[in-house]
Amino acid sequence: PSTSSAVTLRVNGEKYTLTVDHRTTLLDALRERLDLTGTKKGCDQGQCGACTVLLDGRRAVACLQLAVAAEGREVTTIEGVADGDRLHPVQQAFLDLDGYQCGYCTPGQICSALAVIEEHAAGWPSAATEDVRPEAGAPALTPDEIRERMSGNLCRCGAYTQIVQAVARAADQAKETV
Ligand code: FES
Ligand code: FES
């Protein structure tokens, strides 16, 4: 039986059709075949979050997704986050508040943060807030909640303090624009 198939990927609004070995991960397809190297490979086994992308708006670690399984789904990588030359508020917050040192984890942190802000606004439960969430209305995204929701994204440089500040600022801004 054939070990490869044609797959059509929709990435950052563009369509790409390529033939991939069935074992090719979405991460390798993005980086090696589409030259979208913004998505980083840290552990390649689902433990570091460096490869986080959005799949139909929800975060996913691209090293644990097969490229063929992404057929028909909308993939957003860090290259698709800005609006032309205008940075997304989450990117701007990381820049302004020094939310990185080497920057290797940053694309994954930013993709994760985008989803975290949405998850919080939608009232998805979090271990850090289950007991304190009021009946109605989303409270501010607290540092504890940010740390808990972002816990799948490791930073070997230890920029966590500034990452938390950046996510908090971007979440506040998103709330103001609703
Ligand atoms: Fe995917 Fe580490 S490279 S989680
Ligand atoms: Fe270096 Fe996070 S900024 S790993």
Image (cartoon, rainbow, N blue to C red):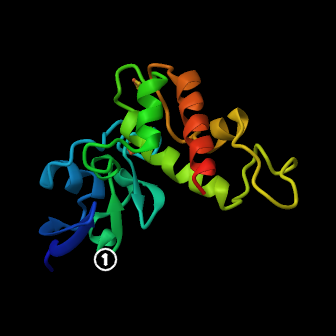
Q: Position of residue 133 (x, y in %)?
A: 83, 51
Name the quarter where the N terminus is drawn.
bottom left
Total marks in image: 1
Q: From the viewer's perspective, is 9 left or right of 1?
A: right
Q: From the viewer's perspective, is 63 left or right of 151?
A: left
Q: Is residue 103 visible?
A: yes
Name the quarter where the C terminus is drawn.
bottom right
Q: Residue at x 35, y 36 (%)?
A: 42
Secondary structure type for disc 1? loop
Q: Quadrant of residue 173?
A: top right
Q: Residue at x 39, y 55 (%)?
A: 64
Q: Which residue is mark 1?
A: 72
Query: Is 178 or 66 nearer to us in this picture?
Result: 178
Q: From the viewer's perspective, is 6 left or right of 93?
A: left
Q: Position of residue 123 (x, y in %)?
A: 71, 59
Q: Residue at x 46, y 41 (%)?
A: 90
Query: From this viewpoint, which residue is outermost toward the bottom?
Result: 1
Task: Tell me the quadrant of ligand 2.
Answer: top left
- Disc 1 under 8 Å from ligand 1? The reply is no
Q: Position of residue 2 (x, y in %)?
A: 13, 77
Badge 1 amino acid: Gly
